[in-house]
Amino acid sequence: EPKNPLRTTDPGTIEMLKVAQENKLETVFDRFVAQQPQCGFGYKGICCRICLAGPCRVKAEDGPASRGICGATAYTIVSRNLVRMIAGGAASHSEHARHVLHTAHELVEGKTKDYEIKSPEKLHKLAEKLGIETLNRDNMEILGDVTELAYEDFGRYKDRPAAFLDSFLIEQRHNKFLNTNIMPRNIDGTVTELMAQTAQGVDADPVNIIFGGLKGSLADLVGEYIGTNLSDVLFGIPEPIVSEANLGVIEEKMVNIAVHGHNPVLSEMVVGAARELKAEAQKAGAEGVNIVGICCTGNELLMREGVYLATSSASQEMAILTGVLDAMVVDIQCIYPSLTQLCDCYHTKMITTEAIMKVPGAQHLAFNSETAMEDAKKLVRIAIEAYKRRDPKKIALSKTRNSLVAGFSIEALTDIFGKINPERPFSVLTDAILSGQIKGVVQMAGCNNLKRQQDESHVAILKELVKNDVFVVATGCSAGAFAKMGLMNSEAVEEYAGEGLKSFIRQLEEANPQLSTKLPLVFHLGSCVDNSRGMDLVQAMAKELGVDTPKVPFAASAPEAMHEKAVAIGSYCVSMGIPTHVGTMPYLEGSDLIYGIATQIAHDVFGGNFIFEVDEKIAAQKILNALEYRSWKLKIHK
Ligand code: SF4
Ligand code: FE2
């Protein structure tokens, strides 16, 4: 039973939940309760619906009822279900990437005038990494070759590894993935193969299925590398930036537009359009247009533009309950279809923008890169119109907003560390680990999942880690949780960091007087596709230490994993040799064998493994143990 009947620990959400209760408005928190108890077979992963002879359930320990009609056993059913989630995750991240890629391609073809190469520096760095000639070449020509190669990564039929993975790998991981046969040569083919492999009457071998899944997870990473890098080229490399988070950033005097989902291609334009249409908003009686972000679209804009982060996934509905949100503009992923139900009770306009993402009751405005700015202006004007129809009786503002510092791309971290050691920036991090000043690095990621109290696990694990001198980087709604709670700023360093971490962060600040801000307790790496930045980080550390990734004191944690994308991310983290904590159980407890593969055998083969632990204190301890073991081994070998 929850300690807090509200099922959230986020103060902004608690304020708004009272409004929902007073007005008898249904939210995700009610629906979660209404779903209890959830299906035990589904929970354990032993319900198979892959063919029409089913659904089959594993109902007994042995005998005919211990298998599906076709004879599939628990381990086959569990592993198939699990890797199909990875296929779903890889498809999601790569569709996001494909959209960014199409936009870059349209730019090369001269079909859009609204985008530009915002960071030629990143373009050159990326091209060099990919082995594309840059000397004496025009930027557009270089980008043309980069997009060509990225398209090949989606559909390559020749037997060579996907470039947007392989070029980012250290040699040891490259060899490991080739030797274990999980190196993907493309994205689309890998996802299709995984669906075919797990169809009725195909693969029944759980190890082979899981390895297929790991290949799928690496295809997911290909998509993330494309998404992150091309977004940096088009919209700029994130740099340290200050902003604010939580529902209090939705301001009464402004026309408020929430941009929600994952893809920066549209939302970056909305930010531009909002600046241009300020006068129109003022004519309508507002002071201007206030863009606020939700989920990863929010993270993308926060990282590059300093746009306020209104809230994260489980509390997305709450933005509407303020009564002053004029438009909810969504792109893809993690968007609750229930949003329209709440918009109906308010003046708020809900607008979908992507061909594969429509919701009954929402207005659809197809967004095209050729007419990007025009489309974005239409969206802003819809919000200005809606602003005039606000109902003053329904206004219930949140008072919660916290300051934050975000924008820590690998380039930004390299600059910061480079002020101490310009030749070997990442030695600053690894030396601090070897000297015992900090214990290691943890990448916190993932969603909200109401099986836990919203954000409680993110926050509890973070506090435990930083108290024990762990350097924490964060992405997605985990970063969102910290931002909303005021844990992503300098005051939080004072309050929560252990002495070692505190001295490390202060040392970085002293070496970086050019920064206009002090450094935060936890370093925001970006959106969910930017988990790829974390893979760059762990490999930079490995290079610095002269070891493979399984020896680096680096761990990952997704305390409230929810989406299929999180299953894919967790799986590539394990393939990358990282101990990976997950705080909400994936559907695998129906097979001890699969549980064993995920937690033990994976470790023997890849050096990384899943740590499934729902208790925050114990989870933090297990993560700390994993770090400590690795640094202890490093120190005796130095
Ligand atoms: Fe049942 Fe086998 Fe069909 Fe699954 S694939 S539904 S276990 S018959
Ligand atoms: Fe996300």
Image: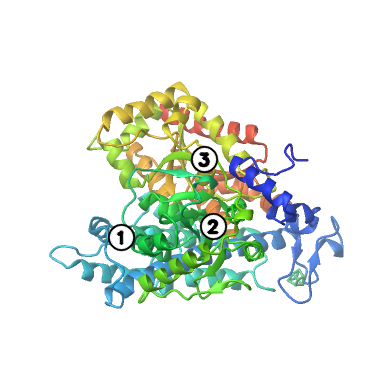
Q: Residue 225's x, y, as percent? A: 40, 58
Contact check, label 3 and label 1, Cβ < 8 Å: no
Disc 3 marks which residue?
A: 482
The three-letter amino acid code for the residue at tag 1 is Val
Q: Answer whether residue 607 is visible to the viewer in this image.
A: no
Residue depicted at x 54% and y 57%: 325
- In the visual, does 593 lie left or right of 387? right
Q: Is mark 3 within 8 Å of ligand 2?
A: no
Q: Residue 549's x, y, as percent? A: 43, 43
Q: Residue 353's x, y, as percent? A: 49, 71
Residue depicted at x 62% and y 61%: 346
Disc 1 crowd, CA 10 A, few/some/many (<14, 14-19, 20+): many
Disc 2 marks which residue?
A: 325
- In the visual, does 443 lie left or right of 105? right
| Near-viewer residue (401 or 67) | 401
Which label was assigned to residue 233? Answer: 1
Contact check, label 2 and label 1, Cβ < 8 Å: no
- In the visual, does 102 lie left or right of 337? left
Q: Residue 39's x, y, as percent? A: 79, 57
Asked if 373 appears above or below 24 in the picture, the reply is: below
Residue depicted at x 25% and y 36%: 514
Residue depicted at x 27% and y 33%: 512
Q: Answer whether residue 595 is visible to the viewer in this image.
A: yes
Residue 420, quarter of picture:
top left
Asked if 357 appears above or below 179 in the picture, the reply is: below
Which of the two discs, 2 and 3, sits closer to the camera?
A: 2
SS for dot 3: helix
Image quadrant where one finds the C terminus: top left
Residue 50, quarter of picture:
bottom right
The three-letter amino acid code for the residue at tag 2 is Leu
Disc 2 crowd, CA 10 A, few/some/many (<14, 14-19, 20+): many
